Image (spheres, rainbow, N blue to C red):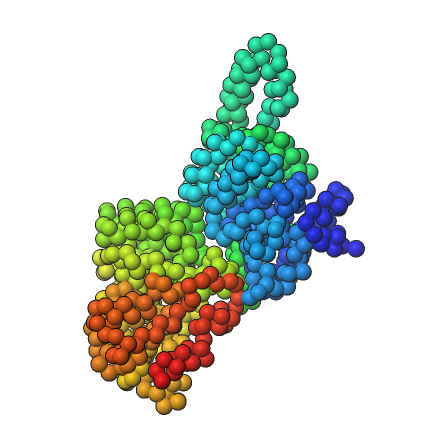
Amino acid sequence: MAVLDQINNENDIKKIKPEDYPKLAKEIRSFLIDKISAKGGHLASNLGVVELTMALHLVLNLPKDKLIFDVGHQCYTHKILTGRKDGFDHLRTYGGLSGFPKRSESPCDSFDTGHSSTSISAALGMAQAMVLKNDPSKVVCVIGDASLTGGLALEALNNVASLKRNLVIILNDNNMSISENVGGMNTYLSNLRAGERYNDLKSNVLHTLEKVPSGETLIRNIKKAKSSLKSMMVGGMYFENLGITYLGPVDGHDIEAMVKLTKEALKLDHPCLIHVITKKGKGFIPSESHPESYHSIGAFNPENGCPIPKTGITFTKVVSASMLKLGRDHENVVAITAAMKDGTGLSAFAKEFPNRFFDVGIAEQHAVTFAAGLACQGFHPYVAIYSSFLQRAYDEILHDVCIQDLPVTFLIDRAGLVPGDGQTHQGIYDISYLSSIPNLYIFAPKNKYELYDVINYSYHFQHPLAIRYPKAIASDHLKEFRSPIELGKSELLYKERDIAILCTGSMVSLGERVRRQLKAEGYHVSLLNARFIKPLDEELLNKLSRTHSLIVTIEDNVLNGSYGMAVATYYSFHMGLGDDRVKVLPITIPNTYVEQGTMDELFKITGLNEEEILTKIKAVFE
């Protein structure tokens, strides 16, 4: 009988014999490779924390004790050990098991995560709540060395010393984020990895000394000597100076050592950090060799790790080629990303222009203000960040880039609906959170040619510009329409009367299909590619109002703050046209959070499918 078969509920791991732990770890890895290879998911990060997670489950009593995973893409073993292994056949599918911790999914998931650097803040809040409730439950959070570069994590570390009870921070140090780690924190942790392991003073020794004459003086002298010794041994006292006891480093794949050290850490009456060394992708040679390629991967061959090939060029690859050309043509072009060199398509640029490429780590706020500083000195920065992560830098976009009207171009990848990752990764809010900022212009290309053209256009544009594009194949659909890009001007594809459909970005293809169906049913329909979401093409909107009674907008953004709402507002307030003159029908994503699923499923549940759009248009027009 497989050891894994004995795990059906939380805390079942405590029934497993210690001699069977290595076998259980091996079975969990085989299970993960088998399930993730079928449909995709986060592989390398999960393979790296199998023993670490097992050790925490052996020590903690879930769900009474609280375990928080930073980002959460490494929570698969946790889900297996809490009775959810049968759900892995539907991992990251609509209505199925989430790829991240979800409180609604299990009481053992104590905090919903999805973005990095949040765990220490959340854990500190929970631990403080335990103080207020006089609850002795344990609180542990697991944060990677990459997430520790995030400003929020550093802010939380600064505040942790104020806690007057135990809190254990597990620093999962695999020397990797999604791409290879960079920065001063990585250098500091490298020094800690190289240092010899040391042990803290035993609490019972301190208690004994407190009872003897002059004991307090002895304790002070011993602590002073201990601190000096630590400084020599680990090359720094960063965590200790913040009031957090540092323990480790410890091998994160040694379950016995992890259990022993974690138990000791949980006995302390103040916060501590356990420095755990793990190997990302452990147990699967392809992911061990190339962990960045197996961070989040689609279906692959479990025998050799080779991904199942997909046809077509993605928008991200178009960006990669376009940035390479820009870099060759203009020496003042620089590229910036936040630990997503591969994901944003900047690897080729980084290889050819290493002095003009900057990976700032998981620090989106810093990335934006850093770009502003470069722009002030005559460079043209291109900041490539996913839509759902760029929202973390809202203040910096507004305050540091746009108030100064600096020529910073934002390459917003994964804009719109994103399959698999669910609520925390949907890029359906960027039009809303960016369109209210003065001096910022927003562009959405309809296909690969238009993306290439607007990136070339952006170099000569001396104002902040956001270019948004989806995680999708960049089709050449409607390639016959390729008029020059003009600021604030839409592209008229088909001119008729009665109904005008205005689409943003990749939604133009959907709009073209809707128009084709309406035409087949006898309607007269114009089709426009909005191009610039901001500013609106007011001249064109004025012209449309003379020959069209229904204006339909289609976009992959929530309703509030959408392009469609901007168009409706323009007609209502600026032109003074009531419902009798021009009706505006915004087709958007509802004001909600969207779960994971395939793109077809997501389009259907959000109403961005042909059938529902046709029904709405005909109902309003009639």
Residue 89 lies left or right of residue 406; in this view the side is: right
Find residue 392 and report its horizontal and vertical position in percent: 39, 51
| Residue sitting farthest toward the right | 1
Above/below status of 417 relative to 359: below
What is the quadrant of the C terminus in the image?
bottom left
**Residue at point 53% right, 41% down?**
126
Find residue 19 and report its horizontal and vertical position in percent: 76, 43
Work out whether residue 574 can be spotted. Answer: yes
Find residue 293 and report its horizontal and vertical position in percent: 52, 56
The quadrant in which residue 591 appears is bottom left
Find residue 231 and report its horizontal and vertical position in percent: 50, 25
| Residue sitting farthest toward the top | 213
**Residue at point 55% right, 42% down?**
141
Residue 324 lies left or right of residue 92; in this view the side is: left
Name the one closer to the observer, 254 or 495.
495
Name the one closer to the observer, 447 or 436.
436
**Residue at point 74% right, 42% down?**
18
**Residue at point 45% right, 62% down?**
592
What is the quadrant of the N terminus in the image?
bottom right
Above/below status of 254 relative to 325: above
Above/below status of 444 relative to 160: below
> How many numbered marks are there?
0
Work out whether residue 332 can be spotted. Answer: no
